[in-house]
Image: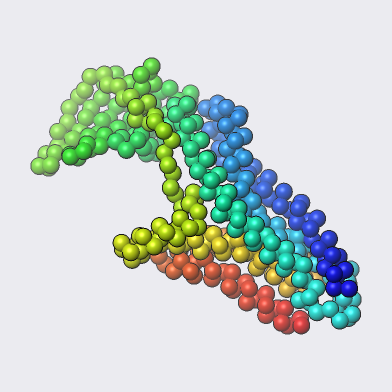
């Protein structure tokens, strides 16, 4: 009887889980494509590069989709059992609610392990590959180097600011070029317009401004100038080492080293560690929540139960993002920013299950 019950409940939740996971992964990657579609259309980025970039976003989308897919699947399966009065019949037959929802909790545990494994072993690699690919696209699509109203780093020696980029990206207007000097203050070059030539960025005329160490400002006109962007930007792809491209062990090591140098200096690494594990753990928390609220919905309230679970998932992601911002800014400790919301939901779910014992 116990094994039959497990198989029956598992069958009710596995189907919706697969459909939900596929749906949310497509929606998340589709949203990423929507955010870059203007750049794709305007600058003619090759289709293979677009496809590769989207594929590299799938692991991250899977990590984000697993918790809400788990919650939706458990809600649909358990709410259907409640709507058909099968939960009531099982409880009359002697099965406790925690025993009935055990397959849902097992699914939550399995997706927790899967989410953490993907975020640990696949997402950092995919993010690194995506960043490297973007670097290569920028080098091959020179119009993507500059964005109006944005600072652009050209290697470690130079920074650009462009007021306007004409359609096609060949003509720039309102160009400011900051060139760093090894033992002196940077030099600012300003040109009304510049265009791409065979050897780099060319200007017909420009002005330079330099603040000396004595505090005196020197400026004056310049003749035609040329900036060799290939020399500034080319070279082997950089080794990106952001928190998104680091594995858990690397985050832990970096956090320990920075904390030894200066207490509090490794905060963002600690926040990323706790947030990464807490997001994966939310799969199990959501399964627990779905099981706790399943008994509250009758036949006429099945849709309400599903809508409430979706609303709860939306609120969860918003609050988790807000808590992460508070953690990064130092308002909350890394532990609280990552685990506060999970702890509150777990307490509420366990209390609801205790009430229905």
Q: What is the total number of numbered labels drawn onto the structure image?
A: 0
Residue 274 visible from this viewpoint: yes
Identity of the residue drawn at 64% across and 60% down: 113
Closest to the observer, 357 or 305: 357
Image coords of residue 17 (percent x, y):
75, 56
Q: Answer with left or right where residue 110 lies relative to residue 153.
A: right
Q: Is residue 342 above or below residue 45?
A: below
Identity of the residue drawn at 56% across and 49% down: 123
Q: Quadrant of residue 54?
A: top right
Q: Quadrant of residue 119?
A: bottom right
Residue 67 visible from this viewpoint: no
The quarter of the image holding the N terminus is bottom right
Q: Answer with left or right where residue 159 lies relative to residue 122.
A: left
Q: Answer with left or right where residue 324 lies relative to residue 208.
A: right
Image coords of residue 225 (percent x, y):
27, 21
Identity of the residue drawn at 39% across and 29% down: 234
Closest to the observer, 278 or 260: 260
Closest to the observer, 41 or 241: 241
């Amino acid at each position: 009887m116990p094994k039959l019950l497990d198989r029956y409940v598992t069958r009710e939740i596995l189907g919706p889980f697969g459909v939900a996971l596929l749906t949310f992964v497509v929606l998340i990657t589709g949203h990423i494509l929507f955010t870059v579609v203007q750049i794709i259309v305007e600058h003619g980025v090759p289709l293979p590069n677009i496809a590769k970039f989207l594929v590299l976003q799938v692991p991250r989308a899977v990590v984000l989709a697993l918790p809400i897919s788990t919650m939706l699947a458990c809600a649909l399966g358990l709410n259907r059992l409640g709507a058909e009065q099968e939960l009531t019949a099982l409880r009359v037959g002697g099965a406790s609610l925690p025993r009935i929802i055990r397959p849902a909790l097992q699914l939550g545990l399995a997706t927790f392990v899967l989410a953490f494994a993907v975020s640990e072993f696949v997402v950092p690699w995919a993010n690194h590959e995506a960043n490297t690919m973007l670097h290569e696209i920028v080098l091959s699509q020179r119009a993507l180097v500059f964005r109006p109203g944005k600072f652009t780093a050209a290697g470690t020696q130079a920074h650009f600011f462009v007021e306007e980029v004409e359609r096609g990206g060949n003509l720039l207007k309102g160009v400011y070029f900051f060139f760093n000097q090894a033992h002196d203050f940077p030099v600012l070059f300003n040109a009304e317009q510049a265009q791409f030539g065979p050897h780099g960025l060319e200007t017909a005329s420009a002005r330079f401004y330099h603040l000396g160490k004595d505090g005196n400002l020197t400026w004056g006109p310049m003749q035609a100038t040329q900036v060799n962007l290939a020399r500034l930007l080319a070279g082997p792809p950089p080794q990106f080492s952001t928190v998104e491209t680091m594995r858990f062990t690397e985050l832990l090591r970096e956090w320990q080293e920075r904390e030894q140098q200066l207490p509090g200096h490794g905060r963002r690494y600690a926040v990323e560690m706790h947030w990464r594990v807490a997001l994966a753990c939310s799969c199990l928390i959501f399964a627990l929540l779905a099981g706790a609220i399943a008994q509250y919905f009758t036949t006429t309230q099945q849709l309400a139960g599903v809508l409430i679970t979706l609303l709860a998932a939306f609120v969860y992601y918003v609050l988790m993002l807000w808590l992460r911002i508070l953690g990064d800014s130092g308002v909350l400790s890394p532990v609280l920013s990552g685990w506060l919301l999970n702890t509150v939901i777990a307490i509420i779910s366990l209390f609801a299950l205790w009430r229905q014992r």
